[in-house]
Amino acid sequence: MTSKVERLRVELGDRAYEILVGPRLIEGAGREILPLLRRRQVVIVSDETVARLCLAKLHESLSEAAIAHHTVLLPPGEETKDLDHFGRLAEEILAFGIERGTMLVALGGGVVGDVTGFAAATLLRGIDFVQIPTTLLAQVDSSVGGKTGINTRMGKNLIGAFYQPRLVLADTDTLTSLPRRELLAGYAEIVKYGLIRDAEFFAWCERQGNALCALEPDPLRHAVMTSCRMKSAIVADDEREEADRALLNFGHTFGHALETETGFSNRLLHGEAVALGMMLAFDFAARLGLVAAPEAERVRRHFEDSGLPTRLDAVGLAGTPADRLIAHMSKDKKVRDGRIALILPRRVGDAFVMKDAPIDALRDFLGEAE
Ligand SMILES: NC(=O)c1ccc[n+]([C@@H]2O[C@H](COP(=O)([O-])OP(=O)(O)OC[C@H]3O[C@@H](n4cnc5c(N)ncnc54)[C@H](O)[C@@H]3O)[C@@H](O)[C@H]2O)c1
């Protein structure tokens, strides 16, 4: 890999922070974190899989910078985002004798990032934290924007806080060990930015997507940077999701229904559900005459070329009763006053919020979706 690291500043007033993207960032983590510390003590939170791959390097880097560090390891997987695990994590962190100046460091995918961010937002009424995302999804999506949270039996991410990190270190070297399916799930979120905001970036994905997924350094860094830039610009304008930030949920309401149907299990990864959700959004918009059919076909072609799912039967969900999917969609957090709001495309690179989707047409469409 080349040694080029790019920096991006997220403009959020006195909570502004930097995102660094490139190789060997874990090796330099101590040096980057040191100037942000009010106390030379950090608590690293990671999962067992990521710890095996990256923790030694992080320990070494913190030790070189003379930063005292403790570590808490969580089991890998979405189950770790529940209240029980969170309770234990909070007690373990407190047992290290942390103070307001202690920094948490989230080393892992979106699960570790969300849980650690929520711990940072709540322990001692708020302490600083740094994100070191190690999945593509976490590098291009979950580590940026300040949403933190945990799941409850009533649904995903229902307890949480908007809480910004002090720094994000997206070390692209970590992605070499990521299973291909996880990599593609992250790629779906990258493509999403092109589809909602930037037709040129989607065209770039059509040309460079395969090189990116083969982890070629330049396309990879460009895609992670572009995604972080777009997400952080949207978040800077609308931190608490009152307007434009909702566009980031493109594909998510359909996707959420599919994830609910598969019990948020490994059968369907979040990014795969989002890919299917985006395809459904294009097909539904084409059915309503809001987008030209060739645009939907163009998206399908790119997903197929990349290895992303485009059809419900590919994940065993064809034939799911439409009413059941609509019921799941109605429980999505984005639903207001019992109406289903959908993010729909006008064309590649331009999406909008339809506040009150026509339910009968939606039912017919989902009933026929294959
Ligand atoms: N906060 C937000 O804005 C936001 C946005 C999108 C998603 N999310 C959340 O993110 C979570 C999903 O994140 P995710 O897809 O990163 O899942 P994840 O954190 O569960 O990671 C996926 C798997 O990959 C493993 N892994 C992580 N890094 C690895 C590496 N470098 N090499 C090999 N294996 C590695 C993990 O141990 C895990 O088993 C969900 O809980 C979702 O709700 C949050």
Image: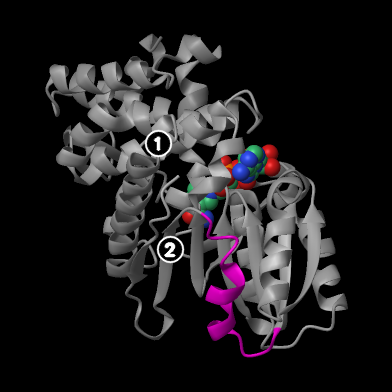
| Residue position marked by numbered label 2 in the rendering | 20
| Residue position marked by numbered label 1 in the rendering | 216
Q: Nearer the viewer, residue 366 or 72?
A: 72
Q: Is residue 205 visible to the viewer in this orientation of the structure?
A: yes
Q: Nearer the viewer, residue 93 or 173?
A: 173
Residue at the spot 85% in from the left edge and 78% down from the top edge: 96
Left/right placement of residue 195 relative to residue 294 reads right
Residue at the spot 26% in from the left edge and 23% down from the top edge: 299
Q: Nearer the viewer, residue 286 or 57?
A: 57
Q: Quadrant of the C terminus?
A: top left
Please check the rendered image and state whether residue 240 is part of the magenta-colored stretch, yes or no.
no
Within 10 Å of the Cα at label 2, are there few (<14), some (14-19), or many (20+) other Cα atoms?
many
Please check the rendered image and state whether residue 27 is part of the magenta-colored stretch, yes or no.
yes
Within 10 Å of the Cα at label 1, are there few (<14), some (14-19), or many (20+) other Cα atoms?
some
Q: Start and end of the magenta stretch? A: 24-40
Tally the numbered discs.
2
Q: Amino acid at mark 1?
A: Glu
Distance, label 2 to label 1, CA atoms, is 18 Å
Q: Earlier in the sequence, mark 2 or mark 1?
A: 2
Q: Amino acid at mark 2?
A: Leu
**On the image, which quarter does residue 240 sit in?**
bottom left
Residue at the spot 38% in from the left edge and 45% down from the top edge: 249
Q: Position of residue 204 (x, y in %)?
A: 22, 35
Left/right placement of residue 41 relative to residue 362 reads right
**On the image, which quarter does residue 266 sit in?**
top right
Of all residues, the one furthest to the front in this rendering is 2
Residue at the spot 66% in from the left edge and 88% down from the top edge: 101
Left/right placement of residue 258 relative to residue 204 reads right
**For residue 340, above or below residue 112:** above
Q: Is residue 340 visible to the viewer in this orientation of the structure?
A: no
Q: Quadrant of ligand 1?
A: top right
